Amino acid sequence: MKAEFHSNIENNTLLLKIKGDLIGDDSGPRLVGLVSDGLQDGVKNCVIDLSEVRYISSSGIGVLITVLTKMRNAGGEVYLASPSEHVKKLLIITKLNNIFNVYDTLDEALEQVKLT
């Protein structure tokens, strides 16, 4: 299933909900574009809700790393929320769980943003 994105900005935080498979295709540039637009609008943090992501390819991982790099270069941070067991295992195997802030629920991620 092709990835769909829903975005919202609250309190200088970009909330991104991804639904479907994050495989890079044209969804990668669209996701990076949403983050770039958010940064232009003054966003300081990005919370990505992965609860409806079924699969992430190596290209999809590259997109997430690009988003992280863009946010950190701008002095911000990325928080990944609600990854499925499959996505969580992928983050652990690739050791990206040591690079990203990963939270079991969206509420936990949003709470952490408030503390920063």
Image: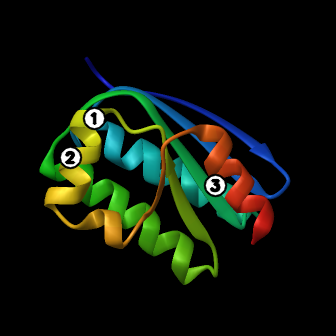
- In the picture, measured across the screen, residue 44 lies left or right of residue 100, that is right
Q: Tell me if 9 is positioned left or right of 108 in this view.
A: right
Q: Which residue is mark 3?
A: 37
Q: Secondary structure at mark 2?
A: helix
- Gap in Å between the C-alphas at discs 1 and 2? 6 Å
Classed neighbour count for the residue bearing mark 2: other residues with Cα under 10 Å, few (<14), some (14–19), many (≥20): few
Q: Secondary structure at mark 1?
A: helix
> Mark on residue 85?
1
Q: Amino acid at mark 3?
A: Asp
Q: Which residue is at a point 71% across and 64% down the rendered structure image? A: 40
Assign a secondary structure to mark 3: helix
* Disc 1 + disc 2, Cβ < 8 Å: yes
Q: Residue furthest top?
A: 1
What amino acid does circle 2 point to?
Lys
**Spatial CA span between label 3 and label 1:** 30 Å
Percent across and percent down for residue 52 are 41, 24
Quadrant of the image containing the C terminus: bottom right
- Residue 6's place in the image compared with 16, above or below, is above
Near-viewer residue (68 or 102): 102
In the image, 23: left or right of 11? left
Residue depicted at 71% across the width and 60% down the height? 113
Calculate the distance from the C-alpha at mark 3 to the C-alpha at mark 2: 30 Å
Q: To which residue does mark 2 refer?
A: 89
In terms of depth relative to the viewer, which is nearer, 23 or 52?
Answer: 52
Q: Which quadrant, please, contains the N terminus?
A: top left
Q: Is residue 112 above or below residue 15?
A: below
Q: Is residue 41 visible?
A: no
